[in-house]
Amino acid sequence: MTERMYDLQELQRYIEDKLSISVRTTVLGFIQRRRNLSAFDRGLASKMGVVARELLINGHSGQAVEMKENKMIHQEFATINIEMADKQGQYRLLKAFSVPKRS
């Protein structure tokens, strides 16, 4: 959701109190682009929030919501970690066989 819809700190406290978990709020545009959020950022965040809410209502937790090929999808966090670990190994292999640039 956008930071202008709600007081994020108030929402954070509410969620923490209701669910007895630690929650962190983040303004996405600042992290990704180091600037104010655009209309696209706000729309994307809202759509991702709707998908995340639907997942939780339907009993699915531990899911990451993402956009792939212009569609909202979700997958388990554990799957993402495995994919990242596989890619890290590939990156190390590529680096080991790469030819240094000549000056």
Image: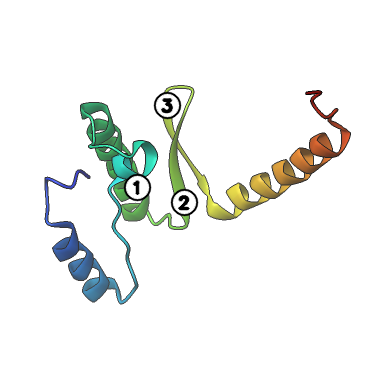
For the N terminus, which image quadrant?
A: top left
The percent position of residue 51, horizontal first and vertical second, equals 33, 41
Q: Secondary structure at mark 1?
A: helix
> Quick one: 92 or 21, which is closer to the camera?
92
The structure's colour scheme is rainbow
The residue type indicated by label 1 comes to: Ala
The percent position of residue 83, horizontal first and vertical second, equals 66, 44
User: Which residue sits at x=34%, y=47%?
Assistant: 52
Q: Earlier in the sequence, mark 3 or mark 2?
A: 2
For the C terminus, which image quadrant?
A: top right
Q: Quadrant of residue 37?
A: top left
Disc 1/disc 2 C-alpha distance (Å):
8 Å
The residue type indicated by label 3 comes to: Lys
The residue type indicated by label 2 comes to: Gln
Instruction: Give the left or right position of residue 21, taking residue 71 as reference.
Output: left
Q: Secondary structure at mark 2?
A: strand
The percent position of residue 46, horizontal first and vertical second, equals 24, 39
User: What residue is disc 1 on?
Assistant: 52
- Say which mark, if any, is on residue 71: 3
Instruction: Give the left or right position of residue 66, taking residue 36 as reference.
Output: right
User: What residue is disc 2 on?
Assistant: 63
Q: Residues within 10 Å of mark 2 (few under 14, many from 20)?
A: some
Q: Earlier in the sequence, mark 1 or mark 2?
A: 1
Residues at badges 1 and 2 in contact (C-beta under 8 Å)? yes
Q: Earlier in the sequence, mark 1 or mark 3?
A: 1
Q: Quadrant of residue 65?
A: top left
Disc 3/disc 2 C-alpha distance (Å):
16 Å
Q: Residue furthest front?
A: 103
Q: Count how many numbered circles sit on residues in the image.
A: 3
